[in-house]
Amino acid sequence: MARVHSKSDLPTKICPVCERPFTWRKKWAKCWDNVKFCSERCRRRKSQAS
């Protein structure tokens, strides 16, 4: 039987644009080290962040 993981066990990062924490997603499994922004909207607004 598979082990159930709770959301609090997942790694988190802080988005440099909105400064909110975001958690690991399955679609980011292979590229988690390269993920910097929490969403597509924040990625597009990255030039506005200081």
Image: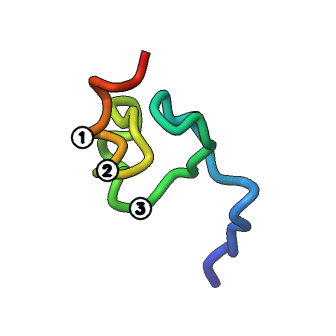
The three-letter amino acid code for the residue at tag 1 is: Arg
Amino acid type, callout 2? Arg
User: In the image, which is nearer the foreground, mark 3 or mark 1?
Assistant: 1
The amino acid marked with disc number 3 is: Lys
Q: State how far apart marks 3 and 1 are (Cα).
A: 22 Å
Other residues around mark 1 within 10 Å, as few (<14) / some (14–19) / many (≥20) = few
Answer with left or right where residue 4 lies relative to residue 35. Answer: right
What residue is drawn where x is 58% and y is 34%? 19
Q: Quadrant of the N terminus?
A: bottom right
Alpha carbon distance from label 2 to label 1:
5 Å
- Image coordinates of residue 7 in percent, x first then y, are 69, 63
- What residue did someone put label 2 on? 41
**Residue at x 52%, y 38% (from the top left corner):** 18
Residue 43 picture quarter: top left
Horizontal arrangement in the rendering, residue 28 relative to residue 18 (left or right): left
Front disc: 3 or 2: 2
Number of labelled discs? 3
The residue closer to the viewer here, 23 or 41, is: 41
Question: Which secondary structure, mark 1?
Answer: helix
Q: For mark 3, what is the residue?
A: 26
Q: Name the residue carrying label 1.
A: 44
Dot 3 falls on a residue whose secondary structure is: helix
Residue at position x 30%, y 36% in the image: 45
Looking at the image, which is closer to me, 44 or 35?
A: 44
Identify the mark nearer the N-term, 3 or 1.
Answer: 3
Q: Are marks 2 and 1 in contact (CB under 8 Å)?
A: yes
Residue nearest the viewer, comparing 24 with 49: 49
In this view, 49 is above or below 27: above
